[in-house]
Amino acid sequence: MSTSLTERAVLSPQPIFEALQGFQVTAVLGTAIELGVFDAVATGDSKAAPLAATLGVDERGLTVLLDALVAIGFLVADGSEYALSPIAEVFLVRAGPSYLGGLADVFYSDWQWRGHLELADAVRHGGTTDVDQDVEAPEHPFWSTFVNAWTGASFPSAQAIAEILRPWSSTRHPLQILDVACGSGIYGALAAGERDDARVDFMDWPTVLTTTRAYAERFGVAQRAGYVEGDMFQIPLGGPYDVALASHVFHHFGPERCVSLLKRIAGSLKPDGRLVIHDFVVTTTKAQEPAAALFAVIMLVRTRGGRVYTLSDFEAMLSEAGFATPELIDLPGLPSRVLVAGTV
């Protein structure tokens, strides 16, 4: 249906400008994190000149950056003095317990930007053709960066999953857990952390597990942890386990690869075991879930076959792999969801 002249007269092109200039917001925030602006403001410097001296940058250049940070809501200004906004104070000061600035290593990197500059090529081919961009490649260096960058952002969902499991897992003695493609291991660690008789096996690439071991110490589960190194599509997964956790794993692969992995996980579980999937699970359409739709773009430029799956997609893949119809659980305030499935 065409747009009438009256409707055209009241339309604003502002959303187009905002979308095309969105990269500037990313650059401003990423640069501030890289230079340590939020940490310097947090220590007491409030004016451009002393901040520039502290950071070792040009005063004019920093003033432009500071004003831009005010404009996008990460600093507040009173005349020539700058202070942290509440969100920056909580999430962007390195010494804080909720620091998320490490995400810049994922989203504000040459590798990430180059991938999106190649989006048109990925659209033409249905996925990346760049070996460097393909995170399905064995032991891709991205995962070593990701494991440190994403851990802080994972706490809310990891805590929620531990709570979801608690009523069921409290009857399992001992409790055996497999954390598939574990990264930092936060999901398996929090699930096992409440139980002295719980043991968790962390599975990932050897380069990632080097970091996982340090996090296991931090999470207090190192004495009850095992490590399964290698390609999850090929190595023995061990077991049998009471529960397998797979957080943000399946969106990296096409359906056939997902079913293959699901069958391997099913074979590692006890007959009455459970698989917990944490991922984007679309229950309407991707167009109605913006976070999922935009994440699907990342999968297009990062993988050969990865995608965001719908609930019906997951149900079909789980059924083919020998799992029962999963229970769907929303995570309030988060774009991801949880599926809990037992074997048939």
Image: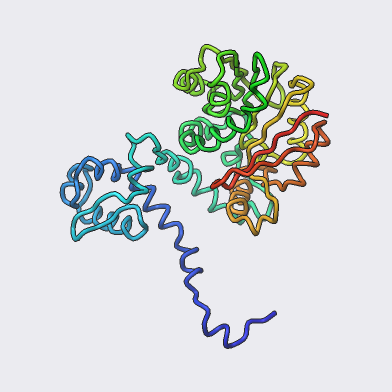
Whether residue 146 sits left or right of residue 3 in the image: it is left
**Colour basis:** rainbow
> Could you tell me which residue is drawn at 50 percent across and 34 percent down?
155
Question: Where does the C terminus fall, quadrant-wise?
Answer: top right
Vertical placement of residue 224 versus 165, above or below: above
- Give the quarter of the image for residue 180: top right
Q: Where residue 328 sits: x, y (%)?
A: 70, 41
- Give the quarter of the image for residue 71: bottom left
Q: Where residue 84 sits: x, y (%)?
A: 29, 49
> Could you tell me which residue is drawn at 36 percent across and 43 percent down?
90
> Could you tell me which residue is drawn at 42 percent across and 40 percent down?
100
Pick the residue in front: 133 or 252.
252
Pick the residue in front: 47 or 271.
271
> Could you tell me which residue is drawn at 56 percent across and 35 percent down?
160
Q: Where residue 258 sits: x, y (%)?
A: 73, 36
Number of marks present in the image shown: 0
Question: Where does the N terminus fall, quadrant-wise?
Answer: bottom right
Q: Where residue 332 sits: x, y (%)?
A: 56, 46
Whether residue 229 sits left or right of residue 341 in the image: it is left
